[in-house]
Image: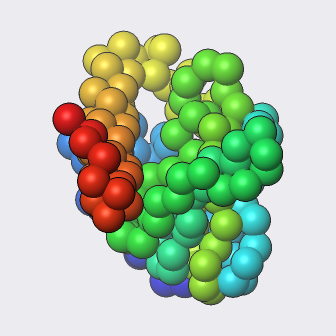
Amino acid sequence: MESEMVSTEWLKRTELFGGLDETRLSNLLSDAVIKSCSAGETIFRQGDKANGLYILIKGVVDLTVKTQEKTDLMTSKIEKEGAVFGTASLMEPFRYNVSAVCLNSSEVLVLDANLIRKKMEEDPKTGMEIMKKLASIYFIRLNQLRAGVSDLLKPFKIKTR
């Protein structure tokens, strides 16, 4: 991994942190680590304590929700460089609401969620910017999942409104 790949400039191009200034981005990177994962490796499990916020550097990560019957209910893929996941680490109760598994050899940037939350509290303007982007990310992903469910139901001619 080339060090310039995970710089403040790179972080500025990610979906969650675009628009933050260099100083704020440098602070977020201070404890960050790059994690390499092999195909099939679980990054975190649904229900685990959410200590890290993840940003995809390369590869593909599958996010799944398990039902009470322990089957995968919904799946979405994180495959775009700079895409964020593990966002439950920024919201109470700070437990992952999905499981994340690498579908192929992948690299992710792991940011300390406690540090991010602390910075958001210290600087409410930054906190508000991050939360607005986080809400937008959730809204986009919700609409993508809805579209996927709608496509699945089309053969059954079930109206989804």
Q: On screen, 121 above or below 55?
A: above
Model colouring = rainbow
Q: Residue 4: where, in percent of width, then height?
A: 41, 75
Name the residue nearer the viewer: 61 or 151: 151
Q: Residue 112: where, in percent of width, then height?
A: 64, 42
Q: On screen, 47 above or below 86?
A: above
Name the residue nearer the viewer: 78 or 110: 78
Q: Is residue 31 visible?
A: no
Q: Residue 118: where, in percent of width, then height?
A: 57, 22
Name the residue nearer the viewer: 82 or 95: 95
Residue under the image location 28 percent in, 59 percent down: 154
Q: On screen, 145 above or below 35?
A: above
Residue under the image location 39 percent in, 17 percent down: 123
Residue under the image location 36 percent in, 26 percent down: 131
Query: Residue 33 sits in which quadrant?
Result: bottom right
Residue under the image location 57 percent in, 66 percent down: 62
Split into 4 quadrants, where in the image is the N terminus? bottom right
User: How many marks are shown on the rendered structure?
Assistant: 0
Query: Residue 38 sits in which quadrant?
Result: bottom right
| For residue 79, side relative to residue 67 (left or right) | left
| For residue 78, side relative to residue 67 (left or right) | left
Furthest residue toward front: 157
Split into 4 quadrants, where in the image is the C terminus? top left
Q: Is residue 100 visible?
A: yes
Q: Residue 26: where, in percent of width, then height?
A: 44, 47
| For residue 150, side relative to residue 92 (left or right) | left
